[in-house]
């Protein structure tokens, strides 16, 4: 018997924000799903976005792809934030969020420089990770 897919996925973005905010390497940055007021791409900010993924019914497993956009006043700061975010999320196995549990995190695309066409002065690195979550 297969389990039907859930009507909603767990709020993995909120879970990732919590994991990143708890990491001391990101204490000087704003970690959020949406840019803060007055954001122009040069502040130390890590934005968390779910970029897809899949529900595996038989395993009761969600596999969201999580994008981390790391910004800073210069490339070095942005890269340091990207590496701190990557480190924090790669270490999240075992983290429990509501009725979901992170079982594994795999890097899909490491931090890479990517110009931001919305914020012309931005220094941005983007990282993509797959988070495996079990839950009900």
Image (cartoon, rainbow, N blue to C red):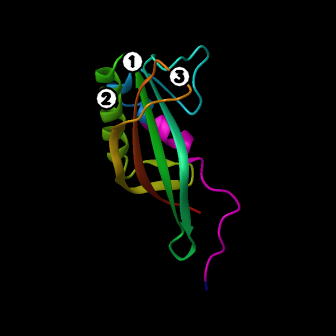
- Residue placed under numbered mark 2 in the picture: 79
- Spatial CA distance of label 2 from label 3 is 17 Å
Is 15 placed above or below 107 here? above
Rendered location of residue 127, percent (x, y)? 39, 42
Q: Is residue 108 left or right of residue 7?
A: left
Secondary structure category for the residue under label 1: loop
Q: Which residues are magenta?
A: 2-19
**Which marked residue is nearer to the observer: mark 3 or mark 1?**
3
Q: Residues within 10 Å of mark 2 (few under 14, many from 20)?
A: many
Residue 15: say if magenta: yes
Q: Residue 119, labelled with which disc?
A: 3
Rendered location of residue 130, percent (x, y)? 42, 54
Rendered location of residue 35, percent (x, y)? 57, 25
Is 29 placed above or below 56 here? above
Q: Residue 85, labelled with which disc?
A: none
Residue 75 or residue 80, whichever sits in front: 75
- Spatial CA distance of label 3 from label 1 is 21 Å
Q: Residue 28, labelled with which disc?
A: 1
Q: Is residue 127 left or right of residue 134?
A: left
- Spatial CA distance of label 2 from label 1 is 14 Å
Measuring 61% from the left and 16% from the top, which residue is drawn there? 37
Q: Residues within 10 Å of mark 3 (few under 14, many from 20)?
A: few
Secondary structure category for the residue under label 2: helix
Mark 3 / mark 1, whichever is N-terminal:
1
């Amino acid at each position: 018997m297969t389990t039907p897919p859930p009507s909603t996925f767990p709020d993995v973005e909120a879970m990732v924000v919590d994991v990143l905010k708890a990491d001391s390497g990101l204490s000087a940055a704003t970690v959020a799903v949406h840019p803060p007021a007055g954001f122009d791409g040069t502040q130390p900010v890590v934005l968390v976005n779910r970029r897809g993924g899949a529900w595996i019914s038989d395993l009761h497993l969600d596999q969201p792809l999580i994008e981390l956009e790391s910004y800073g006043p210069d490339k070095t700061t942005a890269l340091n934030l990207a590496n701190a975010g990557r480190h924090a999320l790669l270490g999240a196995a075992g983290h429990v969020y509501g009725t979901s549990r992170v079982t594994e995190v795999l890097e899909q695309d490491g931090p890479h420089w990517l110009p931001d066409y919305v914020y012309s002065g931005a220094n941005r690195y983007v990282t993509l990770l797959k988070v495996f979550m079990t839950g009900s």
